[in-house]
Image (cartoon, rainbow, N blue to C red):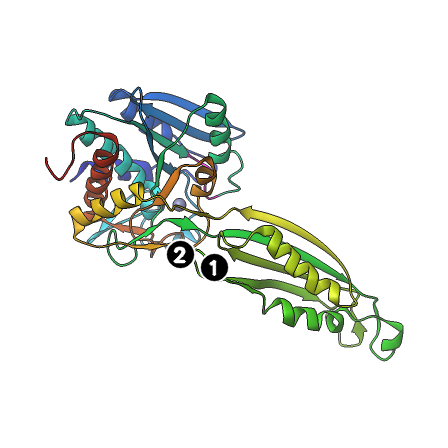
């Protein structure tokens, strides 16, 4: 059995449900310390973070990942214990198998393999892990980024090990992510008897036209790398449950996943101008979920694509879809960010799994990326 598989199995056996790290980072730190890494455990609130670096000078390449996992869901729906990595034909099943303990294991084994060859380094290597990616993400990578900024530490390339592959290892990588902005609108009416509408003010009727206009809002992507941004209404609540009462208010939630071509201010302005056109009383509260990013420099993207191609023969597709990731905290520092990890078909589900043969492939690809970016040895000539 390969080394990455063994390490992933050990990590899965640790019940690290957000924000509990359950000893995963201690295990990783001891492996990295053994090969000469400088270790810093950064605890913010109840969140464990690990910052480990190797090398003295040159551009900094960082593997970014998380040790926390989402809860198991109904345990009796699992075919095996979610915290015992179990082989099932070509698959390893367990919570975190794909998201993302296999990638974290591959970070370590790829670095171990890479340094074993005594490469002549022209850059530095870092590993950044948090136990709060699946949760509120307040005391995780965003705090570590503040800490690094204070130290004057600057990341050049960041490889996020989130599971991006679709049907085969390496077929999809992410070079950006959309931002997320939400609003809650409270439309204030006047409650009354349905038989006396002139003595009430029905917020459902009042909001019907703005609702139709809001649901058509769309912003064109100008980067060519993102889908157009659309507004989605996710909740709408009004009414007392009986048929003879006009409700006193209506509450609605909306969310926009937006490309970097559309600013939060633009979205706010367009929503507000629809609301202001109509004779309604309302309050609105905005929540910014995450900023969008897009990596446009080519060196990290090329290193990842070429390394995948060398191991698998695949030409990866670059995408920017899906939810947000911790890459959103690193990109604003000026670092190039690319996400690449194993298949994501089973993430957050019961019987989450990863293909066992992909573990070795992932470690081999990560090693070639390290070689291309941080050493003088070109993997193609070795
Ligand atoms: Zn993840």
How far across and how far down the image is residue 338, in percent?
Answer: 35, 44
Tell me where the magenta segment starts and ends, as one range: 130-134
How far across and how far down the image is residue 366, in percent?
Answer: 24, 39
Tell me: 303 left or right of 139: left
Check the image and name the residue furthest to the left: 382
Q: Quadrant of residue 15?
A: top left
In the foreground, 152 or 199: 152
Q: Quadrant of residue 10?
A: top left
Main secondary structure type of the part rendered in magenta: loop
What is the C-alpha distance between the residues marked 2 and 1? 8 Å
Quadrant containing the C terminus in the rendered view = top left
Residue plotted at (28% across, 27% down): 123
In the foreground, 67 or 313: 313
* Mark 2, residue position: 225
Confirm whether the magenta stretch covers residue 133: yes
Mark 1 within 8 Å of ligand 1, using the beta carbon:
no
Residue plotted at (33% across, 41% down): 101
Q: Specify the label residue 221 is tagged with.
A: 1
* Up/down of 222 relative to 57, above or below: below
* Up/down of 90 relative to 107, above or below: below
Q: Are marks 2 and 1 in contact (CB under 8 Å)?
A: yes
Tell me: 75 left or right of 7: right
The secondary element bearing badge 1 is classed as loop
Residue plotted at (29% across, 21% down): 55
């Amino acid at each position: 059995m390969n080394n990455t598989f063994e390490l992933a199995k050990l990590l899965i056996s640790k019940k690290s449900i957000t924000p509990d790290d359950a000893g995963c980072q201690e295990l990783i730190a001891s492996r990295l310390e053994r090969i000469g890494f400088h270790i810093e455990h950064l605890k913010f609130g109840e969140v464990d973070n690990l910052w480990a670096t190797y090398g003295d000078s040159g551009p900094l390449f960082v593997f970014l990942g998380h040790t926390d996992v989402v809860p198991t869901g109904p345990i009796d729906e699992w075919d095996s214990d979610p915290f015992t990595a179990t082989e099932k034909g070509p698959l390893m099943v367990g919570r975190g198998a794909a998201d993302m303990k296999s990638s974290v294991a591959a970070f370590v084994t790829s670095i171990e393999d890479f340094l074993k060859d005594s490469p002549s380094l022209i850059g530095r290597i870092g590993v950044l892990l948090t136990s709060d990616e699946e949760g509120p993400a307040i005391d995780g990578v965003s705090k570590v980024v503040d800490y690094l900024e204070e130290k004057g530490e600057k990341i050049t390339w960041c490889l996020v090990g989130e599971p991006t592959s679709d049907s085969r290892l390496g077929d999809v990588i992410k070079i950006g992510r959309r931002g997320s902005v939400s609003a809650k609108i409270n439309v204030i009416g006047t409650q009354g008897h349905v038989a006396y509408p002139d003595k009430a003010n029905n917020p459902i009727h009042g909001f019907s036209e703005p609702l139709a206009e809001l649901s058509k809002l769309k912003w064109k992507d100008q980067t060519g790398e993102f889908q157009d941004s659309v507004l989605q209404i996710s909740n709408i609540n009004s009414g007392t449950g009986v048929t003879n009462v006009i409700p006193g208010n209506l509450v609605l939630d909306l969310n926009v996943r937006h490309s970097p071509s559309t600013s939060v201010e633009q979205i706010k302005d367009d929503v507000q101008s629809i609301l202001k056109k109509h004779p309604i009383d309302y309050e609105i509260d905005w929540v910014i979920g995450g900023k969008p990013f897009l990596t446009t420099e080519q060196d990290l993207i090329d290193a990842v694509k070429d390394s995948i191609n060398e191991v698998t023969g695949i030409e990866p597709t670059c995408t920017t879809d899906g939810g947000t990731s911790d890459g959103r905290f690193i990109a604003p520092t000026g670092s190039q960010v690319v996400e690449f990890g194993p298949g994501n078909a089973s993430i957050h589900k019961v019987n989450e799994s990863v293909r066992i043969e992909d573990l070795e492939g992932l470690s081999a690809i990560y090693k070639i990326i390290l070689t291309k970016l941080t050493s003088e040895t070109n993997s193609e000539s070795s």
